[in-house]
Each structure stands twice: as C-alpha cells, then as structure tokens.
Image: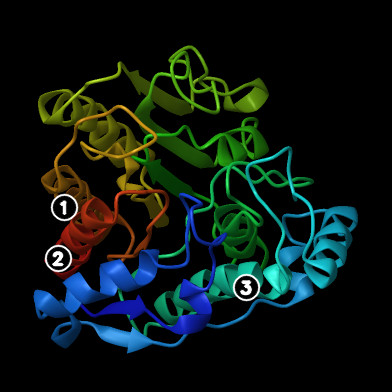
C-alpha cells in the first residue's frame, strides 16, 4: 500500500504568528520527527497545491470567500469573532490547505496512491459562511462535496479524534444520511465549541446516523480504546466508499488548551484500525488530516504514529 505525505513551506505557512497556539512552526516540528524516525524514506512526498475558487465554492458561500479575500489583502482584523486573525495572503495560504487535501483525494481515486496524510489540514470548525476556531476554510467540507460532485461517491465516513468537536462538519452534514460522522472529543461543557453531545445523532433523514462520543476532562487511553470500539463498529456497519480521518493531536496529554490525556499510541491505533476497515470496504482509501494540536512534541509524535499506521 502506497502512502503519500504532503509537505512543503506553502502548507506549513498556515498559522497565525508568534504567540498564537496555531503557529506556522507546527509542520516543521512534525517533519523533524518524521525524519528522525526515517519515515520520510517510507512515504512518497508530494508538494502542496492551491485550490481554485470554484473548488472552495463547493462548500463555502461566495460572500464569505469575498470577505476572506478582502481581509487577506489588508492583513488586518479577525476573520471570526476573535480566534482567527487575518494576515496578508491568508486567502492563498488557506486555499493551499484545501488544495493539498483535494490533490491527495485525486491521487487516491486515480489509483496513484492508497493512503494520504496532510499534516496541516483538518480545519473542522469553519462553517460554509464563516471562519471559527483557527479554521479559515473547511477542507473537510470541500473534500466531501468534491467526492460527491466530481467523483460521484456517496457513502463517505468521517472520523475525528481531535479534542474539539468537529462542529463545522457535523452541522454542515447533520441532515445527510450518506455522511457517517464519528467524533471522540472532550465534553463540550468544558471545551470549545460547546457542541457534540451524545444526543446529537443527526436530524431529518439522517437521524441516528451520527455518533458523538464526549469524554470528560482527564480521560485517558482506556477511555479512548473503549470509545474507539464503538467508532469501529459504526464505520464498519456503514460500509463506506471513502474514509476521512481527522487526527487532531490536542487530545494528547499535555496540550496547553485542552484536558484529555491520550498517548500518541491512541492515534496510531485509530489509523491502523481505519486502514483495516478501508482495506475490506473501500480499496484501502484513508485520507488523514493533522487537525489541532498545540504542544509541538505531542503533535510530532502523534502524527507520526498516524503515518506509521497508514504505512501498516
């Protein structure tokens, strides 16, 4: 099974400056550890790609895209209510996150690779018409719409183990029965964005098709592995055509803005198990995204566990 890793300065540039939790040094921290473990010798490297406006518009509104372009030219103000500052060129940098994810998808569906990892991606808070929580464009939402519109795939599974609930994905597809959504996260009563209660299982035609598993602050690996069995059973029962994995490393013990206590091994376990499911059901296709994670050592270890899991 061939695994492709997207890496490059244009991708790593997605960040909000010194002192911001989501700084532009995150990719480099990951990449140093990749090289230390010699995993760079086992993957195929790919350069970042920038998405065009038509691709972004599969998920985002034209009005919102215009607003980000305006803020990108000025480099002043906030794109959301105060978490996500604008900087000059933010439109292009955020478009590169999306474009790299879409290129990974293209390589997979053309049979040129089986697994993909994009470390700076998985921006799961952005809505169709707004930024939120360090997320300018929702690469996951654009990917899902692209899988449907361009590749005519319907049954897509999205699995998220970031400490924060993937609200931008959940609410965009809350009424979509063909999007299996499984999210293990810190209980929203204690952490942004305050959503993802177990009772949120979808609505309308999709009622009962979404799985939210909130865990209390301090939950560790035993709690994760117990929750994971529910996720694996749910995804297997859905029989997906494509699996998206948001592997946010802010659920690892010692993150500065969250309160879960997983070890990096949890991320490797999740990646490995998803690959097993994918091998049985969707030609091995797992597209993994780095997501959050604000302790550089943690994200370097957890994301490389994901790469190892993808490699098998």
For the residue pair 132 and 239, the one nearer the viewer reads as 132
x 33%, y 40%: residue: 161
Q: Residues within 10 Å of mark 2 (few under 14, many from 20)?
A: many
x 52%, y 73%: residue: 13
* Residue 53 placement (x, y as % from top left): 78, 73
Instruction: Report which residue position mark 2 lands on.
Output: 308
Q: CA distance from mark 1 to mark 2?
A: 7 Å
Res 47 quadrant in image? bottom left
Query: Depth-wise, is mark 3 or mark 1 nearer the camera?
Result: 3
State the SS at label 3. helix
Instruction: Report which residue position mark 1 lands on.
Output: 268
> Going from the N terminus, do you reach mark 3 or mark 1 first?
3
Residue most extreme to the front: 19
> Going from the N terminus, do you reach mark 2 or mark 3 first?
3
Relative to 197, 285 lies left or right: left
* Residue 250 placement (x, y as % from top left): 33, 42
State the SS at label 2. helix
**Screen quadrant of the C terminus:** bottom left
* Residue 235 placement (x, y as % from top left): 33, 39
Q: Which mark is residue 230?
A: none
Instruction: Report which residue position mark 3 lands on.
Output: 93
State the SS at label 1. helix
**Screen quadrant of the N terminus:** bottom left
x 16%, y 48%: residue: 264
x 64%, y 46%: residue: 126
């Amino acid at each position: 099974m061939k695994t492709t890793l997207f890496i490059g300065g244009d991708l790593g540039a997605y960040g909000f400056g010194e002192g911001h939790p989501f700084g532009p040094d995150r990719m480099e921290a990951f990449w140093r550890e990749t090289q230390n473990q010699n995993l760079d010798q086992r993957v195929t490297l790919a350069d970042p790609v920038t998405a065009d406006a038509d691709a972004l518009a599969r998920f985002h509104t034209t009005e919102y895209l215009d607003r980000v372009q305006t803020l990108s030219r000025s480099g002043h103000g906030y794109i959301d209510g105060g978490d996500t500052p604008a900087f000059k060129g933010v439109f292009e940098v955020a478009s590169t996150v999306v474009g790299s994810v879409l290129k990974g998808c293209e390589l997979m569906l053309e049979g040129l690779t089986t697994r993909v990892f994009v470390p700076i991606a998985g921006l799961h808070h952005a809505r169709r018409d707004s930024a939120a929580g360090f997320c300018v464009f929702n690469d996951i939402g654009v990917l899902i719409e692209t899988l449907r519109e361009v590749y005519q795939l319907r049954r897509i599974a999205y699995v998220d183990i970031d400490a924060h609930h993937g609200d931008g994905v959940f609410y965009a597809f809350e009424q979509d029965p063909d999007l299996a959504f499984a999210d293990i996260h810190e209980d929203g009563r204690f952490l942004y964005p305050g959503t993802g209660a177990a009772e949120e299982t979808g609505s309308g035609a999709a009622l009962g098709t979404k799985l939210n598993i909130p865990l209390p602050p301090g939950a560790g690996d035993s709690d994760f592995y117990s929750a994971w069995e529910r996720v694996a059973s749910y995804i297997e029962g859905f029989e997906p055509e494509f699996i998206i994995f948001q592997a946010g490393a802010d659920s690892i013990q010692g993150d500065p803005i969250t309160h879960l206590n997983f070890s990096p091994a949890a991320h490797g376990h999740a990646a490995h198990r998803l690959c097993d499911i994918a091998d049985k059901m969707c030609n091995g296709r797992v597209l993994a995204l780095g997501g959050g994670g604000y302790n550089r050592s943690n994200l370097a270890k957890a994301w490389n566990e994901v790469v190892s899991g993808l490699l098998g």
